Image: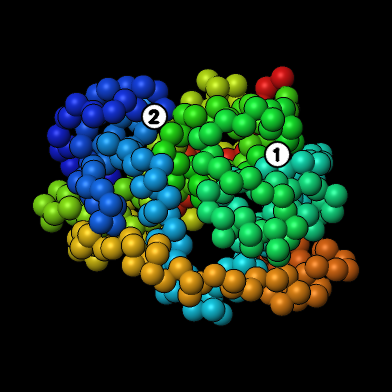
Amino acid sequence: MANASFNDARVQREQPCRLCGGQQAHLLAETAYWDIRNTRIVGCDACGLMQLDPMLTGPETDRGCLAYYVEETLRTAPREQVRNLVRNYRRGVLFAWGLKAQGHRPRTLLELGPGSGYFAAGLRRIFPDLEVTVMDVNTEVLHLNARDHGFAGIRSMPEEHHTGLDDRFDLVVARDILEHVIDIGAVLRNVMHYLRPGGLFHFITPNGHEDVWKHRLRHHLGRERSELLINHVNYFDGRGLRQHLEQLGFDRVTYYTYGLKTTLRGRGWSRKPKLWAPVSRSRSAGEFAEDRLHEVQGVAHRMDAVLPSWYRRGPVWPLLLLSAYQHGHFLRVDPARGIGHEIHGVFRKRG
C-alpha cells in the first residue's frame, strides 16, 4: 500500500505490544505529548497495532486528556458545540434503530468515555427503558452525564476491572475511545467480562493507517518530532483488530470502514506539506488542565435547550429519516484494506 511506502527503521521495543505482547516493531514517528512526555509511535510486527512506545502512564493520560478537553472546548464555538450534541443524538437514534431492526432489545448499556452522553440519549429514544451506566476518568464528564441525562456514573480508567460489572450488560459502547486507552488488551478483556453471553460490543475508532500518516510524514520528510495533543496512543490495523477480537471470543456482526472522503482527498498516501502533523512546541498541559478549567465548568447541555421538542417526543420516523440522511453509511469497505477514515464495529460475545 502507498501508506507503507516509507522505509521504517527496525527497533527493539521499550515495552511489549499491549495487544499481543510482541517485542519487535518498526519506527513510524517520533512525537511529543504536550510538555508531558517525548515518545515514539511504533508498529508491531506480529499483530499490526501501531501505538506509543513507551506508553503514557495513567497520571500522564489524566492530565493530557483534561488539557485537551479544555483546549478543544475553548476553541469550539458554542453553536458548533450544540451542533455536535445534536449529531451524536441522531447517531444514537440511528444505531438503536438498526439494533431493533435486527431483533436486539438491549436493557442495560455501559458506555466507556461517553463524552456529552447524547449518543446514549439517542439510544434511549428508541429503547425508553434502557438503563445507562457511563464510565470515565473525568469527573466533569460524569457530572454532566448525571445532570443532563440522569445516567449512573463510574469514575475509572477503562483498564481497571470491576468484578461487580461482570455479566451485567447487554451492550457495551466504546465510540472514539479505544484509540485513547493505555492498555487496549486489558480494555477488550474487560468488555468481554462485562457483557452477558450474546451481548454486543459496539465501537468506532479511526483507521490507524490514515490516523498515523501525518506523523509519519513529519518524521520521514520533515525529520522533526511531531505534536500529539489529543492522546491517540493506539492506531489500529483493520485486519489485526478483527483477528484479536475473534481470538478473544467475539463474532463479527458488522465491521467496515466509512468516511472515505478524506482518503480520496489524499490522506493516507499524499505527501503534501499541509498534511504533515504540526511540529512539537511542547505546549503546556498545565495551562489548560489547571489554569483554564474554570472557563468550561458548568457548561449547560440540557436536552430541552439543545434538541427540538419533536426530536424527544412524538413519532420517531421523521427523526429516523433525518438521521439516516445525515449519518447513514452507504459506502462500506473492509477495514483489512487499510483505507477509510473510521472503523465501525459491532461484535457479539459468544455463548
Q: Quadrant of the C terminus?
A: top right
Q: Which residue position holds label 2?
A: 18
Residue situated in front as seen by the camera: 126 or 343: 126
Residue 288 — which label?
none
351 relative to 116 in the view: left or right:
right
Is label 2 in a helix, a strand or a loop?
loop
Q: Is residue 169 visible?
A: yes
Residue situated in front as seen by the camera: 261 or 66: 66
Is label 1 in a helix, a strand or a loop?
strand
Residue beneath the point at 53% across and 34% down: 160
Residue situated in front as seen by the camera: 164 or 345: 164
Q: Is residue 175 visible?
A: no
Q: Position of residue 244 (x, y in %)?
A: 48, 26
* N-term mark: 2 or 1: 2
Tag 1: amino acid: Leu
Residue 293 versus residue 215 in the image, above or below: below
Report the coloring of the rendering. Answer: rainbow
* Outermost right residue: 314
Q: Local crowd at mark 2 within 10 Å, few (<14), some, or many (≥20)?
A: some
Residue 286 versus residue 187 in the image, above or below: below
Residue 85 versus residue 230 in the image, above or below: below
Q: Which residue position holds label 1?
A: 171
Residue situated in front as seen by the camera: 10 or 229: 229
Q: Position of residue 61 (x, y in %)?
A: 39, 48
Q: Quadrant of the N terminus?
A: top left
Q: Position of residue 64 (x, y in %)?
A: 38, 54
Residue beneath the point at 31% across and 48% down: 212
